[in-house]
Amino acid sequence: MKSKKSLKTYTLDELTDKYIGKQGTPKRDSFELELKLEMLSHAVKEARKIRNLTQEELGKLIGVQKSQISKLEKNLTNSRIDTIIKVFNALNVTLNFQLLFNKVDKSRVSFS
């Protein structure tokens, strides 16, 4: 009789650490930023669909071309934060930002 080998399972964090890099490394930071931008693009598209608007209609509401909305939804452009805020305002969606401060070298921080 053959014995069954159990498969080793890995968490998403373990796989990300192994193949992308540990948290705090430049490669991991870049990966996570890209992932967050992708989620933002998806949120724009879903909110637009919920409001039953075409890309062209949304563009007209905020004063941009349909192509800019398309690029935003496909995460093909680095959109300005004011454009993203205009989009969510036009869609009547509340947008919250969370700022997380990393460890700061206080000897290098100055305020004028």
Image: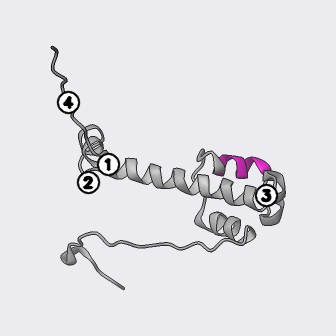
Judging by the rendered image, the residue that carries numbered circle 2 is 23
Q: Which residue is mark 3?
A: 59
Whichever of callouts 2 and 3 sits on the residue coming sooner in the sequence is 2
Q: Earlier in the sequence, mark 1 or mark 3?
A: 1
Give coordinates of residue 75: x percent, y percent.
58, 47
Which label sits in the foreground, 1 or 4?
4
Specify few, some or many for label 4: CA neighbours under 10 Å numbering under 14, 14-19, or 20 or more.
few
Residue bearing the label numbered 4: 6
For the point 53% across and 74% down, the residue is 96
The vertical placement of 112 against 17, above or below, is: below
Residue 68 within the magenta-colored segment of the rendering = yes
Q: Is residue 81 above or below residue 65?
A: below
Q: Evaluate if marks 1 and 4 touch, with contact meaning CB atoms under 8 Å apart.
A: no
Question: Residue 87 location, x and y as percent?
Answer: 70, 64
Point 64% across, 51% down: residue? 72
Q: Label 1: few (<14), some or many (≥20) within 10 Å?
A: some
Judge the density around disc 3: few (<14), some (14-19), many (≥20) Cα neighbours within 10 Å. Answer: many
Q: Secondary structure at mark 3?
A: helix
The part of the chain drawn in magenta is: 66-72
| Residue 82 horizontal/vertical position (percent) | 63, 68
Q: Residues within 10 Å of mark 2 (few under 14, many from 20)?
A: few
Q: CA distance from mark 4 to mark 3?
A: 54 Å
Residue 107 highlighted magenta (yes or no)? no
What residue appears at the point 56 percent right and 57 percent down from the top-left corner?
40
Which mark's residue is nearer the viewer, 4 or 3? 4
